[in-house]
Image: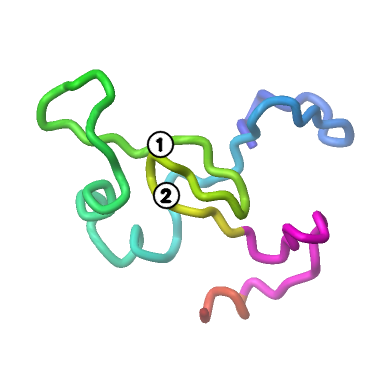
């Protein structure tokens, strides 16, 4: 979560988007390839028509495809059908 945007972690308001992603993922295509390859694969042309510029961004929601990137965020240990967390072993998911 954004470092100073949340004042009370016991009562978080979820009416706004909450940033929970590290800026540098530790696995997957981003980790295995160069950053430029990742942006070329999942990014999109600049919306202000800046030449030779590609962007990566958008609102990524667990279990929902993000149209600008074509990616669907998955959260290990979260059951989207039940709407709740399950205990998970990080080592188990890192091996997948």
Q: Position of residue 2 (x, y in %)?
A: 61, 31
Residue 14 as seen in the image, left or right of residue 10: left
In this figure, which residue is indicated by the disc labeled 1?
57
Q: Which residues are magenta?
A: 75-90
Of 21 and 17, nearer the camera is 17
Q: Main secondary structure of the magenta part?
A: loop
Of 75 and 64, nearer the camera is 64
Image position of 68 with respect to 64: above or below: above
Mark 1 Cα-neighbour bin, 10 Å: few <14, some 14–19, many ≥20: few
Tag 2–tag 1 contact (CB < 8 Å): no
Residue occupying the point 64% across, 71% down = 90
In this figure, which residue is indicated by the disc labeled 2?
24
From this viewpoint, which residue is outermost toward the left? 52
2 vs 1, front mark: 1
Mark 2 Cα-neighbour bin, 10 Å: few <14, some 14–19, many ≥20: few
Image-quadrant location for residue 74 = bottom right
Which SS class for mark 2? loop
The quarter of the picture where the N terminus appears is top right
Which SS class for mark 1? loop
Q: Is residue 81 magenta?
A: yes
Q: Position of residue 46 (x, y in %)?
A: 24, 28
Image position of 44 with respect to 33: above or below: above
């Amino acid at each position: 979560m954004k470092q100073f945007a949340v004042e009370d972690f016991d009562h978080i308001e979820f009416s706004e988007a909450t940033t929970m992603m590290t800026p540098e993922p530790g696995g997957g295509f981003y980790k295995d390839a160069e950053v430029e390859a990742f942006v070329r694969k999942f990014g999109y042309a600049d919306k202000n028509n800046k030449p030779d510029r590609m962007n990566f961004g958008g609102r990524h929601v667990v279990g929902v495809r993000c149209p600008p990137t074509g990616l669907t965020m998955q959260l290990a240990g979260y059951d989207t059908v039940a709407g709740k967390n399950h205990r998970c072993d990080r080592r188990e998911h890192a091996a997948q």
